Amino acid sequence: MRLYELMLILKAGADEEQLEASIGKISDLITNQGSEIVKIDKWGKRRLAYEINGNTDGFYVVIEFNAENDATFEVERVLRITEEVVRYLLVRKD
């Protein structure tokens, strides 16, 4: 297993309960792929450098997890079609 870092920008227009539900859904997706979450770091609401799909603010979340390479393909596929996700970046940490 390798260590990965996933940075998410979620839509900031949602209330705290909806944001927690979105983070929970994404963390469940990661653990259902046979991965283990090391750390979830919520940075909070921040202003975006430029407007993305009509959003000027975003809620930033960083998730570190251990996973096999094949598990990351499914995580990325689901993140691409999730409405709450404005942008994401998944990198392998060395």
Image (spheres, rainbow, N blue to C red):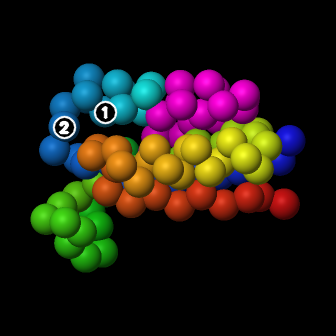
Q: Is residue 47 visible?
A: yes
The crowding category of the residue bearing disc 1, from other C-alpha atoms within 10 Å (few below 14, some 14 to 19, many at least 20), is: some
Considering the numbered disc 1 on the image, is that residue within a helix, a strand or a loop? helix
x, y percent for residue 68: 79, 43
Q: Is residue 23 above or below residue 11?
A: above
Q: Report the amino acid beneath label 1.
A: Leu
Q: Which residue position holds label 1?
A: 19
77, 65: nearer the viewer: 77
Kindly identify the residue that appears in the image at 26 percent across and 23 percent down: 17
Magenta stretch holds residue 42: yes
x, y percent for residue 94: 84, 60
Q: Which mark is residue 65?
A: none
Write the start and end of the magenta stretch as one range.
26-43
Q: Report the amino acid beneath label 2.
A: Ala
The crowding category of the residue bearing disc 2, from other C-alpha atoms within 10 Å (few below 14, some 14 to 19, many at least 20), is: some
Residue 84, located in which quarter of the rendered image?
top left
Q: Which mark is residue 14?
A: 2
Q: Quadrant of the N terminus?
A: top right
